[in-house]
Image: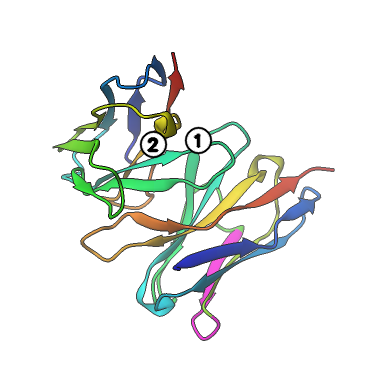
Amino acid sequence: DIQMTQSPSSLSASVGDRVTITCRASQSISSYLNWYHQKPGKAPKLLIYAASSLQSGVPSRFSGSGSGTDFTLTISSLQPEDFATYYCQQSYTTPRVFGGGTKVEIK
Amino acid sequence: EVQLVESGGGLVQPGGSLRLSCAASRFTFSNYWMHWVRQAPGKGLVWVSRINGDGSSTNYADSVKGRFTISRDNAQNTLFLQMNSLRAEDTAVYYCAREGFSGVRAFDIWGQGTMVTVSS
């Protein structure tokens, strides 16, 4: 199975900060990489699919990049509603493995 | 509004069985692959199983293979997960999720989740 490794596992940031989360696949997954965020007690929500395509309705402060094994999610200016846990997921093959998550907390 | 609503969770003893349901609305259910994803308390997301649009193809995580069965009833717009031989480590919130069309291949719609607790 493909392994997905996210870093950092947690971070503290302030409103307005630029935040970057990385995700590494154990083998090449082309651009089959998705990003979700999840707030406590809620279902995950799709932010980015195919590494860099913004899901409809998601604010443009979210962006994704990368291909092959290394990927990045960037939040250009962190907003109060962005404090959540972020997960990457590969959709290159089954099982559709998720990364371990990155918890973004308020500094 | 496009929606998925899970039901069927609850408390079950180790070795017991449970059947989860996921009711879909406001989209053509039979056109989509559907998935189950679970999340143990305080832990991350774990993919469990998937099924194609007509129900002819299924896949499972190794941890549930041989114990769980995914199925669907397209006439009733409902996805199922039959869970047998349940273990304590199956305790989790179970989400159903829709996979977008081939160009998306991501889970674009999620249900609210249903809690399964396996304990004596």
Magenta region: B68-76
**Residue pointed to by mark 1:** B44
Mark 1 and mark 2: span between their CA atoms?
A: 8 Å
Q: Chain of mark 1?
A: B
Residue B44: horizontal and vertical position, in percent? 50, 35
**Residue pointed to by mark 2:** A87
Left or right: residue A91 versus residue B67 is left
Question: Mark 1: which amino acid?
Answer: Gly
> Tag 2's secondary structure?
strand
In this rendered view, identify the residue nearer to me: B56 or A76: A76
Q: Chain of mark 2?
A: A
Image quadrant assignment for residue B52: bottom left
Residue B75 colored magenta?
yes
Q: Residue at x 75, y 46 (%)?
A: B118
Q: Residues within 10 Å of mark 2 (few under 14, many from 20)?
A: many
Indicate the quadrant containing the C terminus of chain A: top left, top right, bottom left or bottom right: top left
